Amino acid sequence: MYEINKIIKKIRDDNKLTQTEFAAFLSVSHQTVSSWERARTRPTLVMLKKISQSFNIPLSKLLPVDKVPKKSKRDLDKEKLAHAFLCLLSRSDMRNVTMQDIILESGLSPHYVSSLFSTPLDILTFIAMKIEQEISIALEHTTATDPFIILADVILPILYQHCHVLKILYSKNYANGE
Protein backbone atom coordinates (compact mmCIF):
# COMPACT_ATOMS: atom_id res chain seq x y z
CA MET A 1 0.00 0.00 0.00
CA TYR A 2 1.17 3.52 -0.88
CA GLU A 3 1.88 5.51 2.27
CA ILE A 4 3.62 8.79 1.49
CA ASN A 5 3.66 9.68 5.20
CA LYS A 6 6.02 6.78 5.93
CA ILE A 7 8.14 7.52 2.86
CA ILE A 8 8.62 11.17 3.90
CA LYS A 9 9.50 10.21 7.47
CA LYS A 10 12.04 7.68 6.18
CA ILE A 11 13.64 10.29 3.90
CA ARG A 12 13.84 12.73 6.79
CA ASP A 13 15.20 10.11 9.20
CA ASP A 14 17.71 8.79 6.64
CA ASN A 15 19.05 12.33 6.28
CA LYS A 16 19.12 12.82 10.06
CA LEU A 17 16.88 15.89 9.89
CA THR A 18 14.34 17.10 12.40
CA GLN A 19 10.91 18.08 11.11
CA THR A 20 11.93 21.73 11.47
CA GLU A 21 15.16 21.22 9.50
CA PHE A 22 13.37 19.21 6.81
CA ALA A 23 10.66 21.90 6.60
CA ALA A 24 13.22 24.70 6.30
CA PHE A 25 14.99 22.83 3.54
CA LEU A 26 11.71 22.61 1.59
CA SER A 27 10.50 26.13 2.52
CA VAL A 28 7.40 24.90 4.33
CA SER A 29 6.39 25.02 7.99
CA HIS A 30 7.29 22.25 10.41
CA GLN A 31 3.53 21.87 10.94
CA THR A 32 3.20 20.99 7.25
CA VAL A 33 5.83 18.25 7.56
CA SER A 34 4.13 16.99 10.72
CA SER A 35 0.81 16.92 8.90
CA TRP A 36 2.37 14.90 6.05
CA GLU A 37 3.95 12.42 8.43
CA ARG A 38 0.69 11.95 10.35
CA ALA A 39 -1.15 11.43 7.02
CA ARG A 40 -3.45 14.40 7.66
CA THR A 41 -2.44 15.97 4.35
CA ARG A 42 -0.27 14.96 1.42
CA PRO A 43 2.44 16.95 -0.31
CA THR A 44 1.50 18.41 -3.66
CA LEU A 45 3.01 17.08 -6.86
CA VAL A 46 5.21 20.18 -7.02
CA MET A 47 6.45 19.48 -3.50
CA LEU A 48 7.05 15.80 -4.30
CA LYS A 49 9.14 16.91 -7.27
CA LYS A 50 11.10 19.24 -4.97
CA ILE A 51 11.69 16.41 -2.46
CA SER A 52 12.71 14.14 -5.33
CA GLN A 53 15.25 16.63 -6.67
CA SER A 54 16.51 17.79 -3.27
CA PHE A 55 17.16 14.31 -1.91
CA ASN A 56 18.08 12.66 -5.21
CA ILE A 57 15.17 10.22 -5.10
CA PRO A 58 13.33 9.19 -8.27
CA LEU A 59 9.87 10.76 -8.38
CA SER A 60 8.46 7.31 -9.13
CA LYS A 61 9.50 6.25 -5.60
CA LEU A 62 7.36 9.04 -4.13
CA LEU A 63 4.26 8.36 -6.21
CA PRO A 64 2.20 5.24 -6.64
CA VAL A 65 2.82 3.77 -10.09
CA ASP A 66 -0.63 4.77 -11.33
CA LYS A 67 -0.11 8.36 -10.17
CA VAL A 68 3.10 9.16 -12.06
CA PRO A 69 1.98 11.90 -14.42
CA LYS A 70 2.35 11.31 -18.14
CA LYS A 71 2.39 14.46 -20.23
CA SER A 72 1.69 14.59 -23.92
CA LYS A 73 3.88 16.59 -26.30
CA ARG A 74 1.02 19.09 -26.57
CA ASP A 75 0.93 19.56 -22.76
CA LEU A 76 4.71 19.94 -22.63
CA ASP A 77 4.59 22.53 -25.42
CA LYS A 78 1.87 24.48 -23.61
CA GLU A 79 4.10 24.54 -20.55
CA LYS A 80 7.02 25.63 -22.73
CA LEU A 81 4.95 28.54 -24.06
CA ALA A 82 3.86 29.49 -20.54
CA HIS A 83 7.51 29.47 -19.48
CA ALA A 84 8.48 31.63 -22.48
CA PHE A 85 5.68 34.05 -21.62
CA LEU A 86 6.83 34.32 -17.99
CA CYS A 87 10.47 34.76 -19.05
CA LEU A 88 9.49 37.62 -21.30
CA LEU A 89 7.35 39.22 -18.60
CA SER A 90 10.17 38.99 -16.09
CA ARG A 91 12.30 41.26 -18.24
CA SER A 92 11.69 44.85 -17.24
CA ASP A 93 11.42 46.10 -20.83
CA MET A 94 8.74 43.59 -21.87
CA ARG A 95 5.46 45.12 -20.65
CA ASN A 96 3.45 44.38 -23.81
CA VAL A 97 4.33 40.83 -24.75
CA THR A 98 2.87 39.68 -28.06
CA MET A 99 2.27 36.18 -29.37
CA GLN A 100 5.10 36.79 -31.86
CA ASP A 101 7.48 37.51 -28.94
CA ILE A 102 6.36 34.30 -27.21
CA ILE A 103 6.76 32.25 -30.39
CA LEU A 104 10.29 33.56 -30.90
CA GLU A 105 11.19 32.90 -27.25
CA SER A 106 9.79 29.36 -27.34
CA GLY A 107 11.27 28.31 -30.67
CA LEU A 108 8.02 26.60 -31.67
CA SER A 109 6.43 27.08 -35.08
CA PRO A 110 3.84 29.87 -35.37
CA HIS A 111 1.26 27.58 -36.98
CA TYR A 112 1.60 25.00 -34.21
CA VAL A 113 1.48 27.67 -31.47
CA SER A 114 -1.74 29.06 -32.94
CA SER A 115 -3.32 25.64 -32.40
CA LEU A 116 -2.43 25.87 -28.69
CA PHE A 117 -3.03 29.51 -27.77
CA SER A 118 -4.41 32.53 -29.63
CA THR A 119 -3.37 35.32 -27.27
CA PRO A 120 -1.15 35.96 -24.24
CA LEU A 121 -4.38 36.07 -22.22
CA ASP A 122 -5.00 32.43 -23.21
CA ILE A 123 -1.58 31.56 -21.79
CA LEU A 124 -2.34 33.49 -18.60
CA THR A 125 -5.60 31.55 -18.29
CA PHE A 126 -3.67 28.28 -18.77
CA ILE A 127 -1.22 29.24 -15.99
CA ALA A 128 -4.07 30.12 -13.61
CA MET A 129 -5.88 26.90 -14.49
CA LYS A 130 -2.78 24.79 -13.73
CA ILE A 131 -2.39 26.40 -10.29
CA GLU A 132 -6.11 25.99 -9.60
CA GLN A 133 -5.94 22.32 -10.68
CA GLU A 134 -3.05 21.68 -8.36
CA ILE A 135 -4.95 23.22 -5.43
CA SER A 136 -8.08 21.20 -6.29
CA ILE A 137 -6.15 17.94 -6.41
CA ALA A 138 -4.47 18.70 -3.09
CA LEU A 139 -7.84 19.53 -1.51
CA GLU A 140 -9.29 16.25 -2.76
CA HIS A 141 -6.49 14.32 -1.05
CA THR A 142 -6.44 16.06 2.31
CA THR A 143 -8.06 14.56 5.34
CA ALA A 144 -7.89 17.85 7.23
CA THR A 145 -11.18 19.51 8.11
CA ASP A 146 -10.00 22.57 10.02
CA PRO A 147 -10.02 25.54 7.60
CA PHE A 148 -6.82 26.95 9.08
CA ILE A 149 -4.97 23.66 8.63
CA ILE A 150 -6.28 23.38 5.07
CA LEU A 151 -5.07 26.89 4.34
CA ALA A 152 -1.69 26.48 6.04
CA ASP A 153 -0.89 22.92 4.98
CA VAL A 154 -2.60 22.58 1.60
CA ILE A 155 -3.25 25.89 -0.16
CA LEU A 156 -0.40 28.13 0.99
CA PRO A 157 2.39 25.63 0.15
CA ILE A 158 1.07 25.46 -3.42
CA LEU A 159 0.86 29.23 -3.73
CA TYR A 160 4.36 29.49 -2.26
CA GLN A 161 5.66 27.10 -4.93
CA HIS A 162 4.22 29.44 -7.55
CA CYS A 163 5.18 32.72 -5.86
CA HIS A 164 7.65 33.65 -8.61
CA VAL A 165 4.91 33.28 -11.23
CA LEU A 166 2.47 35.34 -9.17
CA LYS A 167 5.10 38.06 -8.57
CA ILE A 168 5.83 38.33 -12.29
CA LEU A 169 2.15 38.53 -13.17
CA TYR A 170 1.29 41.10 -10.51
CA SER A 171 4.37 43.22 -11.12
CA LYS A 172 3.48 43.51 -14.80
CA ASN A 173 -0.21 44.23 -14.09
CA TYR A 174 -1.34 41.18 -16.06
CA ALA A 175 -3.22 39.83 -13.06
CA ASN A 176 -5.11 43.12 -12.85
CA GLY A 177 -6.28 42.78 -16.44
CA GLU A 178 -4.17 45.68 -17.70
Image: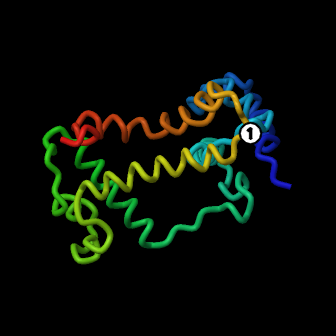
Question: Residue 120 sits in which quadrant?
Answer: bottom left
Q: Which residue: 67% across, 29% down? A: 32
Q: Which residue is nearer to you in this view: 3 or 138? A: 138
Task: Tell me the SS state at disc 1.
Answer: loop
Q: Which residue is mark 1?
A: 143
Q: Is 126 above or below relative to 7?
A: below
Q: Which residue is nearer to you in this view: 15 or 162? A: 162
Question: Residue 176 sits in which quadrant?
Answer: top left
Residue 38 at what x, y percent from top left? 80, 33
Task: Point out the image quarter for the N terminus.
Answer: bottom right
In the image: residue 112, left or right of residue 161: left
Instruction: Give the residue type that dot 1 points to.
Output: Thr
Q: Which residue: 48% across, 47% down? A: 132
Q: Is 164 above or below relative to 133?
A: above
Residue 171 at what x, y percent from top left? 25, 33
Going by the picture, which residue comes out furthest to the right? 1
Q: Which color mode does the image show? A: rainbow
Q: Which residue: 52% across, 51% down? A: 133
Question: Residue 108 sits in which quadrant?
Answer: bottom left
Residue 151 at what x, y percent from top left? 58, 30
